[in-house]
Image (cartoon, grey):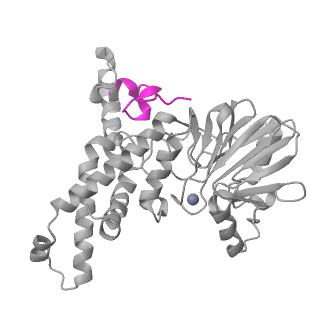
Amino acid sequence: MFFVSGLRCPKVLVNSILAVAVGMLSGCVSTPESHQHSAHNQAVATAAAADFELDGYYESLPSLGKKGYFVEQLAPEVYFFSTGIYNNLFFVTPEGVVITDPIKGKGKLLKQAIREVTSQPVRFMIYSHSHLDHIGDAYLFAGEGVQIVAQVETGKALRKYKDRNRPVPHINFGTNYTLSIGGISIELIYPGEGHGKGNSIIYIPSRKVLMYVDVATPKSVPFKNFAYTIDIASHTRGIEKALKLDFDVYVAGHLHRTGTRQEMEEVLAYHYASKEASIKAIKNVSYLKLRAKTKTKDIENLFGEYLTEVAEQCYQILKPEWKHRLMGFEAFTRGNCDIWISYHRTHKAP
Ligand SMILES: [Zn+2]
């Protein structure tokens, strides 16, 4: 694990010569520099500064090797599986294996990863939510002896989709469900709609490990338009509820690594900051002034110009603090601002 928690610097700082060059630029590290290396360091510094300006904070994806995935034991019975972009947990007990979220196109790799650790059969399959990208290979694990568990809303959605790749759950829970197997208890908790109806927390209290998918990717700005969340306030509340649980490590459904509690708190802080920035931006941008200046005669275009300007201002407010803290800032911040702006227009005016 190469990430240095709490270091507000690009990831390159921690393991390469760039540490010296960028550190000098950013004040993250300070190291004496010899004269003979100064020209080289200058060139590296220039390149790193360009990356820094373009991307802000980032972590490079480590090599997946020939296997195409990573497996890491997080605690007794608890294994982390990642294909770099997507991830999940599986549990190995003397009474069988429990898997979560068989990622679309990666089910065979998950089978291989499980076989690296145990010859026990899969007994349970938990869906975090109904989305195809996360559970699209469920059919590879479904069959005799495998019980599928999901929240009621996930079950409803899957019965509607009639997708053979995503078989419907056998066990449909409401707010809470405890799956006890082979000496561990896996708690399933529905914190409300958030990222989508049915999206549930998978929590192992005895191991202080939690999985909550598509809600708070570590060191990352929420995905485009908050990953298409319909109810943004409920999405924020979901993270607040997750943080009430006692955990040290969490699995976000995405990224090559797990996250820490502090990293989930940081994403929540971005939720608050982007909400606040959107309110400021709404107050800063005058629709009437924009109307006086615009060249368009189309009232819809005018409204579009106004919303674009508000999102731009919101992005500018967030940039000094967040660009160098979270990945995806350039890609997703304006879209996230858009979601809050719609929320203020339709749900709760500032
Ligand atoms: Zn999703």
* Side of 122 where 306 appears, left or right: left
324 to 164, vertically: above or below: above
66 to 289, vertically: above or below: above
* Ligand 1 image position (quadrant): bottom right
Inspect the magenta stretch and tell me whether residue 342 lies in it: no
Say if residue 46 shows up in the picture. yes
Main SS class of the magenta portion in the image = loop
Q: Position of residue 105 (x, y in %)?
A: 70, 58
Q: Please name the residue shown 45% across and 63% down the image.
A: 231
Residue situated furthest front in the rendering: 175
Residue situated furthest right in the rendering: 144
Inspect the magenta stretch and tell me whether residue 16 lies in it: yes
Q: Please name the residue shown 28% across and 52% down the image.
A: 276
Q: Position of residue 214 (x, y in %)?
A: 54, 53
How many numbered discs, if any?
0
Is the N terminus in the top left, top right, bottom left or bottom right quadrant? top right
Q: Please name the residue shown 10% across and 71% down the image.
A: 289
